[in-house]
Amino acid sequence: MTLRLELQKITKKYPSVVANDGVDLSVQPGEIHAVLGENGAGKSTLMKIIFGAVEPDAGTVLWNGKPVRIANPAAARQLGIAMVFQHFSLFDTLTVAENIALGLPSDTKLAELELRIAETAHQYGLELEPQRHVHTLSVGECQRVEIVRALLAKPQLLILDEPTSVLTPQAVSKLFETLRKLADEGCSILYISHKLDEIRALCHTCTVMRGGKVTGVCDPREETDASLSRLMIGAEPPHFSHRPHTPGASILSAHDLSLSKAHPFAVELCDINFEVCAGEILGVAGVSGNGQQELLAALSGEDPRAQANAILLEGKPVGNRPAAWRHAHGLGFVPEERLGRGAVPEMGLADNILLSHQTASTIEYGMIRSGGIANTAKSIIERFHVKAGGPKALATSLSGGNLQKYIVGREVIRKPKVLLVAQPTWGVDVGAAAQIRGELLALRDEGCALLVISEELDELFEISDRLIVMSKGRMSPSVKTSQASLDLIGRWMSGLWDQPATISEGERHDQA
């Protein structure tokens, strides 16, 4: 059988790193092929080469048995290659439909395209509003746009980079059904994920990369999470323990917090009530686009429209206080958007320190202490094992996972009283994810109150002391993690939380 795609000795070098070093890869028609590796292993560069976004320095690409030069993404799409990037390529000021139309023939009728988008999104359980502007979407909703755009092309090869990070367990199952159907119809799929259980459940073949080189090819269905981890990082992932911890006083709370829509496509918040105490992690589950973005804006101070008494920080009314005031009084924030909000792309890592560190070690008499910010950046790079060319490296030069480690580290070392975290390990490899979760637990043990929003339910079960769910701008009651199950939280994510929270021993998450 002729291979759908074959890469021979692909090499790509950058000034400070060899991203791909003589990489070989073979994908058959109808094969779901995983590419696994830690952050910075060279996976994304290799996928960009296949999609024509990056040109290799050496090597050969064979498409359906014939040598090709994929000069740009348009040439890739003509061949039948579609890709969903981890970092999205969407224009904020255009609608969903207008963004998708950019990759289609100029005579495409927008009204017809909107219908096709809505039908495809509904078919695959990825609900979208075609007329909505991208700047009003959450990260999760942007990922849905990218997936639907790729599926509309009916590709021969579909490249997916972390496609399930924003989906419920039910939606993941539906997506897997879709991918298996596509594969049965002859479509080849290159699947990048750090979720080892997904790779083992879905993929036929797995190519493992480390340091820009291929370290092995295996059938993931015959491997364990531990053996895949050893191939990927040379060891099993570091372990951390979630020890029971007695929480202290309430640090951050919301009382009947309601907010009208800030824009036509926002989610209205209705009667939000919760509290998070010192030495506690409160996990917030929910499908992206159900009010999490609006809640974080209200809690962080980016949206100061709330009534003063609707949000309390250490008992003080802060609902109408600006973000800078809350930050100065001990509130930390890790937003879900890494580039553009979590970090300024074209600034160095040291300069990005100033987004959250404005103390005597970084600013003195109104002047920036360049040595101070460089030392702080260096300490984060070393402690969190960030692969970067030093404190002066531009934020945009880092892989998604390494930039995430840096942003989380920047907030953790501040030792805030309260830390709001959105998607702490999105797109982060298994070893780095374990480190980040361990750091969050250590911060909890030191008395910090943490509110963690994540679509990774396994992550929330691992680190949270209590869980709540957001659905359509409303918030469920809280439930102790020890009394919750994936099935229960999955039902609550649909807004069904009128049943008792306590469940039988046989249904508990740790028995699943």
Image: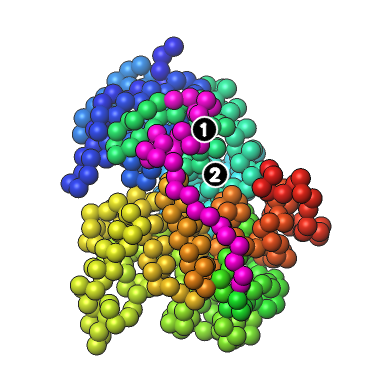
- Camera-side residue: 79 or 285? 285
Q: Amino acid at mark 1?
A: Thr
Residue at image mark 1? 224
Q: Earlier in the sequence, mark 1 or mark 2?
A: 2
The percent coordinates of residue 37 (x first, y second) are 39, 39
The residue that appears at 20% across and 47% down in the rendered structure is 16
| Left or right, 81 with reference to 484 | left
Q: Is residue 245 above or below residue 77?
A: below
Residue 181 visible, this angle: yes
* Secondary structure found at label 1: loop
Q: Is residue 226 above or below residue 493?
A: above
The residue that appears at 71% across and 62% down in the rendered structure is 479
The percent coordinates of residue 83 (x first, y second) are 43, 38
Residue 164 is labelled as 2
Q: Is residue 438 above or below residue 228?
A: below
Residue 453 belongs to magenta span: no
